[in-house]
Amino acid sequence: MEYFDTHAHLADERFSSDRAEVVRRAREAGVTRIAEIADGPAEWDLALKLCRQPHDGVTFACALGLHPYHAADFSTELLDDLKSHAKLPEVVAVGEIGLDYAKGSAPREIQLPVFERLLDAARAIEKPAVIHCREAFPDALAALRNLYPSRPERGGFWGVVHCFTGNADQAVELAGLGFALGVDGPVTYPKNEGLRAALKAAGPSVLVLETDSPFLPPQSSRGQRNEPRAIPEIAARLAETLGLPLEELARAAMDNAIALFSRRPGI
Ligand SMILES: [Zn+2]
Ligand SMILES: [Zn+2]
């Protein structure tokens, strides 16, 4: 079985002493593709460098964005810089971008217009958006409805709401708008029945697997640094949730991830 970890932060300094080992363990676990996500300009070059290095048996691509934690750093220069970087072949998405009202690092009045500008840029350059959304679903959904009034032609996705944490109604609405939902470690936590019900409501045709390494470890390694090798544990719990054989879930998640990141101009 082959897996795509659609959201990891392996450029993080927590991997600086053993990154090659982490990638080797990922490969052994069946993870053959990894999308490296850069949260701000300070990380863009690191993510590109990671994509350009050879990794035995694992293909890397990256997404460049501005995390809502850094919304106050937004400027038109940054936006221009993002647009020119995003044309590079290694860059498969714009992200992560989004809204985070849980930690309150920047007020909503700053975060929301920045998110809308970045989303608009993703749409204009025809790359999918990797969206971070915490306790901000009404505003995020309004922005997405406004900018993406119809589903992408010929299937595919406009982007992904990574580490989806919403309810069943929100899951179904996002799927209907043409967004994939990212599933990670929290799906394995015993208490997360509501999350599992929401993912079941959305269905396997819109779900992609991710670890968000080094964050969000699954149940077997809670409290520890997370790694892409956790993907099979997440996949197994998701397959059980959906009542599907693991092989079938793994294939659907891989197909969805490829469709998500291979969006070509005009699609
Ligand atoms: Zn995030
Ligand atoms: Zn992330």
Image (cartoon, helix red, strand yellow):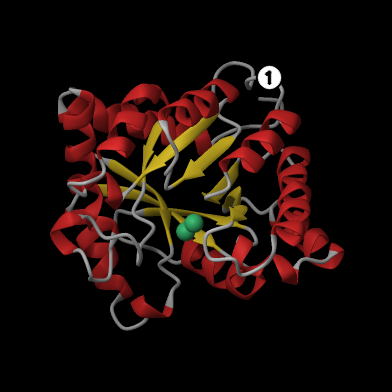
Badge 1 marks a residue whose secondary structure is: loop
When the figure is inspected, residue 189 is found, relative to residue 111, above or below; the finding is above
Q: Residue at x 46, y 30 (%)?
A: 171
State the residue position of label 1: 150
Residue in the foreground of this view, choosing between 27 and 159 = 159
Callout 1: few (<14), some (14-19), or many (20+) C-alpha neighbours within 10 Å?
few
Q: Is residue 247 left or right of residue 102?
A: left
The amino acid type, in three-letter code, at marker 1 is Ser
Displayed quadrant of residue 203: top left
Q: Is residue 15 left or right of residue 188?
A: right
Any part of residue 97 in sight: yes
Q: Residue at x 45, y 39 (%)?
A: 166
Q: Residue at x 13, y 58 (%)?
A: 220
Q: Is residue 71 left or right of residue 245?
A: right
Residue 14: x and y in percent read: 36, 78
When the figure is inspected, residue 166 is found, relative to residue 31, above or below; the finding is above
Residue in the foreground of this view, choosing between 10 and 117 = 117
Residue 163: x and y in percent read: 42, 48
Residue 57: x and y in percent read: 29, 54
**Quarter of the figure that contains the C terminus:** top right
Residue in the foreground of this view, choosing between 204 and 154 = 204
When the figure is inspected, residue 110 is found, relative to residue 190, above or below; the finding is below
Residue in the foreground of this view, choosing between 32 and 203 = 203
Q: Residue at x 32, y 73 (%)?
A: 19
**Quarter of the figure that contains the N terminus:** top left
Displayed quadrant of residue 224: bottom left
